[in-house]
Amino acid sequence: MAPDLRNCSICGRLYSYKGRDVCSKCLEKEDDEYAIVRHYVRDHPGASIAEVSMETGVDEDKILQFLRDGRLISRGLSYTTNCERCGKTIAGGKYCDICLKDLGAQLNSVIPTRRKPEPEVKSWGKSKERMHIREGEEE
């Protein structure tokens, strides 16, 4: 099977697609920028996005993307967003905790659960009244 080749959405370079729309070099750069932002926010709680961008050199749009992706939570930043489902103000991500629970419950209700199979009964002889051993209950 031939690899799925795509162009990186950031730099345009051709790469082998593995679930992300960016190449490994751009992904590494993004991870480095995230680490820089995370450390700055930890050391400077309450900083604005503009301040974080100016002090770290990471673009404001990238910082906002970290917040939308749920990689950063705005407890340390002066920023909030709204739940995409109910509109409630949240610190990061796309959904509030209540909507996440509700969506999880809805998802679990449509996905069949695996039931533990009944143990197999081994019996000797023709009658059901004879002794038998249930699989998995032996000592």
Image (cartoon, rainbow, N blue to C red):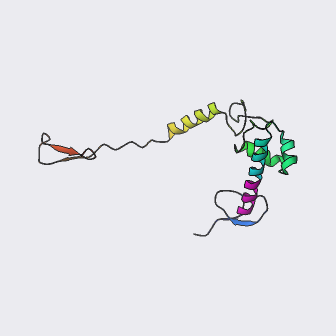
- Magenta segment range? 22-32
Residue 56 seen in the current view: yes
Relative image position of residue 18 (x, y in whole percent): 64, 60
Based on the picture, tell me whether residue 122 belongs to the magenta stretch.
Answer: no
**What number of labels is visible?**
0
Image position of 95 (left or right of 9) = left
Of residue 34 and residue 97, the one placed in the foreground of this image is: 34
What residue appears at the point 39 percent right and 42 percent down from the top-left corner?
A: 115
Residue 7 seen in the current view: no
What residue appears at the point 74 percent right and 51 percent down from the top-left corner?
A: 35
What residue appears at the point 54 percent right and 35 percent down from the top-left corner?
A: 105
Of residue 136 and residue 40, the one placed in the foreground of this image is: 40
Relative image position of residue 54 (x, y in whole percent): 88, 47
What residue appears at the point 83 percent right and 44 percent down from the top-left corner?
A: 52
Hey, which quadrant is residue 29 in on the image? bottom right
Relative image position of residue 133 (x, y in whole percent): 20, 45
On screen, 5 above or below 21? Answer: below
Q: Residue furthest front?
A: 43
Hey, which quadrant is residue 51 in on the image? top right
Image position of 82 (left or right of 56) = left
Q: Main structural element of the magenta stretch: helix, strand or loop? A: helix
Based on the picture, tell me whether residue 31 belongs to the magenta stretch.
Answer: yes
- Which quarter of the figure is the N terminus placed in? bottom right
Q: Residue furthest bottom?
A: 2
